[in-house]
Amino acid sequence: MKLSNSYFYTMRENAKDEDSVSGNLLVRAGMIKKSSAGIYMIMPMGKRVLKKIEDIVREEMDAAGAQELLMPALIPEEVYEISGRRDAFGSNMFALKDRYQKNYVLGPTHEELFTLAAMMKGRSYKDFPYNLYQIQTKFRDETRPRYGLIRTREFIMKDAYSFDIDNEHLHESYMKMFDAYKKIFDRCDLNYKIVKADTGAMGGSLSEEFQAICDVGEDVVVTCEHCGFSSNLEITEVVDRAEECREALKTMEIVETPNAKTIEEVAKFFDKSCDDFVKTLIYNVDGKIYAFLLKGTRELNETKVLKLLQANEMELASFEEVERITHAKVGFAGPIGIDCPIIMDREVSYMKNFIVGANKSDHHIVNVNLQDFEVEMCADIAQVHEGDVCPVCGAPLSFCKGIEVGNTFKLGNKYAKALGLEYLDANNTLHPVEMGCYGLGLERTLASIVEQHHDDDGIIWPLSVAPYQVAIVIVSMKDEEQVRIANELYETLKAEGYDVLLDDRKERPGVKFKDMELIGIPYRITVGRGIAQGNVELRARGAHENEEVAIENVVTYLQDKLQ
Amino acid sequence: MKLSNSYFYTMRENAKDEDSVSGNLLVRAGMIKKSSAGIYMIMPMGKRVLKKIEDIVREEMDAAGAQELLMPALIPEEVYEISGRRDAFGSNMFALKDRYQKNYVLGPTHEELFTLAAMMKGRSYKDFPYNLYQIQTKFRDETRPRYGLIRTREFIMKDAYSFDIDNEHLHESYMKMFDAYKKIFDRCDLNYKIVKADTGAMGGSLSEEFQAICDVGEDVVVTCEHCGFSSNLEITEVVDRAEECREALKTMEIVETPNAKTIEEVAKFFDKSCDDFVKTLIYNVDGKIYAFLLKGTRELNETKVLKLLQANEMELASFEEVERITHAKVGFAGPIGIDCPIIMDREVSYMKNFIVGANKSDHHIVNVNLQDFEVEMCADIAQVHEGDVCPVCGAPLSFCKGIEVGNTFKLGNKYAKALGLEYLDANNTLHPVEMGCYGLGLERTLASIVEQHHDDDGIIWPLSVAPYQVAIVIVSMKDEEQVRIANELYETLKAEGYDVLLDDRKERPGVKFKDMELIGIPYRITVGRGIAQGNVELRARGAHENEEVAIENVVTYLQDKLQ
């Protein structure tokens, strides 16, 4: 593309409303433009990158034997009611009525429609396995869209679904996709970790996430450097160390604790540590109030709770609810005399003589023990801490942040059963089909690449996804010889099949260099005064020096690098 | 692709709820599946065709210098309010609220967002021209979706928008797109006509439609075989022949006409022809009631009326409205004494002594003349008839039906003015930018190809868009030599870069032949008993005979045909 004659722009200033490095750089590079909250236009320069990622994804899906189709975004709401997922998605799903008042939603994911599509094929066991995928626009009404293309409300996803007759075959199909994902993210030059994750609203027996490691990531990736264990914080077990405290039981006592409200203040008041405190958190879980007991230094892990209670949504109880349940001001809840079921973290079950809220304003109870109250369940509901022991090998765990760019699920037969997708085995007996599903976010992958590949001057695209592989910059448009040589190089490289940008704008060379660096073109050829000596300058993006290369050699020289 | 190991199905029976040849064949061929009214899944075999059409469109757009981007489907409603189009689209636009009760619509077309995108580029006259396009999913809540992929509610459109500094440059940009469209439809092997059309809700000074000619088409294409004139029925002028009737004026008389309600019955009652009758049609136009006068043998052209009155919507007035306006039963409306403005067709202005309804039940008035009533406007508001004279050369007009697969508009500066897209000329004076817009329906193009290319056995895809160019059918899967030779041919043709299907299913040959014909693969190689003589059979789809070809020659022989 010749810039003089194209739609092209960049911005010198930082974007005002972008809260991530990738969002800011992509906006400044003229690759994206915000349309409304969490919804972006992908501008021409960005579309080229997105198309390259799309091509990589399609190639690897096809190579793994998956077949492409295309589902609609507008889906009758009843489809999700039949599968039981309408409530699970709740207000994350955009809902609308058509002109005849029929209820529709915008598909956030397509398990249901793919299951229906699978019913078109024969239902003999001989008709399996197969794998169907699409590269299609999804809609999710996120509470808090943010970080540029990382958490948006409209985005392109590649979603694939495998169909098998049993778990062994599902595992084979799953591994094919798993391997294809590794190839895709390797080709995109992403630094990622694969972690076990929660199966959540999707259902199923196994979920693994491909997490691109970067600081802006919203997921906490827990890893063990010793044994290689890795897992999403959401599901990482707090290991049951079963170390009972040897103290003798003391007598419970209610104590007035004026001006002590936080755990730290209460611990200080009693001259104890936070570890001697058991905190009581009150939540509304799918409309029912629960109290959760945790060691003072722990946080509640909501994912574990939702799974334990098989619930969809939870939020902290309102002030009114807390006061009704505890008969006290907020901040003094405790397990003794509270008017709701109690769920206790496993670690608490090894504690003795602990401090709790008294369900009475400005009072706590000391020397509380397990026999002083009743719990409905005791389970691992706490968030793991960095440095806690690895559930596999016992070494200390490390944390880092990740962006979930892909996930792979063994769904099992949840959808097949709900929608009636069955096959006949060799003995003519009906069984539900075993499904897998495999998601990959295209814009999120693009943004993750930028998070990992940039410097102060802009983006540094890997060759595989760069909008153009080479930029040719003409230093002086007034120098006819520079213009001629640059155009010749441009035509030659284009004829060789490379994506080349010719910066033939009437701008100062500094402006052109800055733009090419901002938009992250991997190689730059500068055609300037050096042509008098028969040379042009070659520079890799991110390198600090130019190489002088003879004009007649530059194409061959570049070809080596671009292979 | 090897069929034995793939997702593939066809249906022997006609689809129950498809009202077009293409809809039925595409469903039967396993290429599409209805998801809900006017919304389809594009199944793997259909996706391959759609992808080929998409590739052709992208190639021709890129060749014409357009740059691809991608706009969101979810658009704040206010964007269309600013441009003044929210009302014009009315309930054709899907509308919804997000979780924060903000109003959004699903984009039916993207003039507004492209205008906003154009503002990102510099605003000097030197920054023009450029052309931006996308291949993206559109949503329109059609009153009556039908004909398979021809009138749907969710569909992929290629829409391009050109930006120029004046009308001369707009014309150049327009012609580039116009030529690209011809190349695209030629490559798709469509029989089409280019016709002048209404500019409708889009605004602008010129609109041309690319109409694929077929019986299921919803548009009437008017052509003149003599001079080549062609036009959409919607805007074709009824030529003003200005032949005044020479009769002397007679005296008006009200007559009871028992049991005569239709024009034919009234004409018979008076022993006159329908041409002597002036019919009065009562419509609600954007909420206001109008009476339209037409010669008895004419129909009202609503497009002409909407344009004349600069209105958005019109529908026949309700029975209650008609009775209120005419003080009579429905069927006796006339221009004399009616309580609403009258708009008269130009042809009526040359009539004398005509018959009209009396605005009194079971009565008509004879010998009515122009001075007997007042009209608000007199204009060409009638539908042209086949055989009417050509507005250009006067020869008789012919009609055929067409599917609008593409359209090109000169929008002018309507959107630029509404949204503030301006440029500075060489004298630093601001002007609004002149825009063009260019739409092309991908699924509709696909369906039109099927409407034009099929026979009793199924689809006959043109080579350029066929899902596979060649199908290799193994007659007997038990014959190892047939299997070996077929697989070798398959690998050879694939290595040459062709899209090849290997039918290696354990089905009877008749089933395989029928399937390959139904899905319309252009060439079939049958590997059967002939291999004993060193031959396979080659057959073009639609041909009635097989050719015997030596195994070693078949690849070269095919290559010639596939070039």
Image (cartoon, coloured by chain):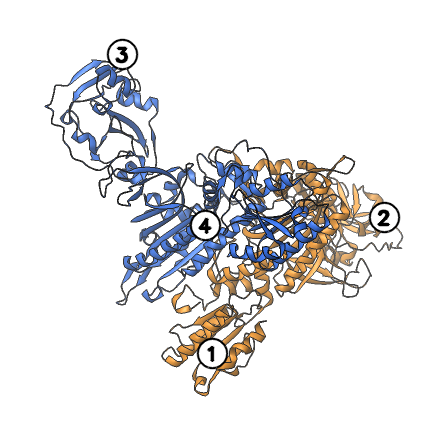
Chain colours: A orange, B blue
> N-terminal of the two: label 4 or label 3?
4
Q: CA distance from mark 3 to mark 1?
A: 92 Å
Q: CA distance from mark 2 to mark 4?
A: 88 Å
x, y percent for residue A296: 75, 54
Instruction: Report the residue marked by disc 2.
Output: A251
Q: Amino acid at mark 2?
A: Thr
Q: What is the quadrant of the C terminus of chain A in the image?
A: bottom right
Contact check, label 1 and label 2, Cβ < 8 Å: no
Instruction: Report the residue marked by disc 1.
Output: A526
- Nearer to us in this view, B5 or B442: B5
Host chain of mark 4: B
Same-chain check, marks 2 and 3: no
**Residue B380 sits above or below residue B550 on the image:** above
Disc number lying in front (2 or 3): 3
Q: Amino acid at mark 1?
A: Thr
Q: CA distance from mark 1 to mark 2?
A: 83 Å
- SS at mark 2? loop
